[in-house]
């Protein structure tokens, strides 16, 4: 259930055996929980022993509400609500994984989730308003008239001025510098949507412990299955050092 009472749709990907930890996967801008990256990374993490909730942000996929109004703040609230629902079900979330704008969202949400012990980002922008470039000439229309119908990823969305203003109001540098949790940054040096300089900004702003892994030759959406599987394998291995505190096992299965 979202903060405003609207229902958020999601699915928990469970491993065959008892999970050694639970995670939330936050999908990319205008994507949904059934996007290739969300499905492949969640399944691969489950294969390595994690239970993973992937859900649709407000107004996307099967979730209720209006997309294009609340910006990053809405995504952050959705993540916090999803983590609360998991905790209420006895599945306390210890790891946040975010892809693209979802990466910016988990960095911002972590400060409101004291149970989270580690954060991983995949192809995340250093500044959330990076996604405004996708609006093209429609951005001027939104700023002048308050809203505009925009084609994003082949689908029409109504984007409002409040969405634009919210994205511009966030400072990832502040969230990152105050993260106080282990951070793993994964990014492709050939990413043409969110350039590798964004990973540099995130990594530079973070305090130790922090790690960077290059997703060599991967595209922004991880459309190649091998790239998503590799990212998940690295995340699971890295996270096991911080999440496996109850002694279920020393490390995730290969």
Image (cartoon, rainbow, N blue to C red):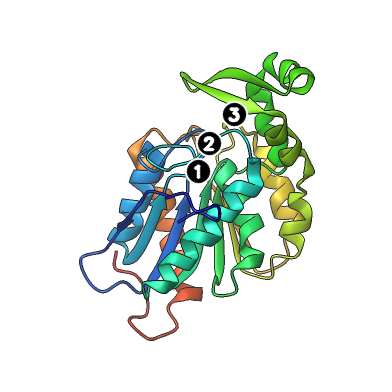
Q: Is residue 123 above or below residue 177?
A: above
Neighbourhood count class around disc 3 (C-alpha, 10 Å): few under 14, some 14–19, many 20 upward? some
* Residue extending furthest toward the bottom: 247
Quote the CA–CA distance across marks 2 and 1: 6 Å
Q: Is residue 58 above or below residue 4?
A: above
| Image quarter of the N terminus | bottom left
Quarter-wise, where is residue 194 in the image?
Answer: top right
Quote the CA–CA distance across marks 1 and 3: 23 Å
Quarter-wise, where is residue 146 in the image?
Answer: top right
Residue 222: % across, % down:
43, 37
Q: Does label 2 or label 3 sit earlier along the sequence?
A: 2
Name the element at disc 3: loop
Neighbourhood count class around disc 2 (C-alpha, 10 Å): few under 14, some 14–19, many 20 upward? some
| Image quarter of the C terminus | bottom left
The answer to whether the residues at label 2 and label 1 have Cβ atoms under 8 Å apart is yes
Q: Which mark is residue 58?
A: 1
Q: Which mark is residue 180?
A: none
Count all numbered tags in the image, as a single digit. Answer: 3
Neighbourhood count class around disc 1 (C-alpha, 10 Å): few under 14, some 14–19, many 20 upward? many
Q: Is residue 42 above or below residue 21?
A: above
Residue designated by label 3: 193
Q: Which mark is residue 66?
A: 2
Name the element at disc 2: loop
């Amino acid at each position: 259930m979202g903060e405003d009472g609207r229902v958020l749709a999601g699915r928990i990907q469970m491993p065959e055996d008892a999970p050694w930890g639970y995670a939330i996967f936050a999908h990319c801008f205008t994507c949904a929980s059934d996007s290739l990256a969300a499905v492949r990374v969640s399944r691969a993490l489950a294969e390595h022993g994690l239970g993973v909730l992937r859900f649709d942000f407000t107004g996307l996929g099967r979730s209720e509400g209006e997309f294009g109004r609340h910006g990053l703040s809405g995504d952050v609230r959705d993540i916090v609500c999803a983590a609360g629902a998991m905790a209420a079900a006895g599945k306390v979330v210890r790891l946040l994984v975010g892809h693209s704008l979802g990466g910016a969202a988990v960095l911002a949400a972590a400060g409101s989730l004291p149970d989270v012990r580690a954060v991983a980002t995949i192809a995340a922008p250093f500044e959330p308003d990076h996604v405004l470039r996708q609006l093209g000439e429609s951005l001027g229309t939104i700023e002048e008239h308050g809203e505009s119908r925009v084609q994003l990823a082949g689908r029409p969305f109504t984007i409002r001025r409040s969405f634009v203003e919210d994205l511009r109001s966030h400072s990832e540098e502040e969230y990152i510098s105050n993260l106080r949790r282990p951070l793993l940054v994964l990014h492709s040096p050939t990413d043409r949507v969110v350039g590798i300089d964004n990973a540099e900004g995130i990594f530079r702003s973070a305090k130790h412990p922090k790690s960077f892994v290059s997703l060599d030759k991967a595209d922004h959406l991880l459309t190649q299955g091998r790239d998503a599987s590799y990212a998940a394998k690295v995340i699971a291995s890295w996270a096991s050092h911080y999440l496996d505190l109850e002694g279920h096992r020393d490390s995730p299965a290969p």
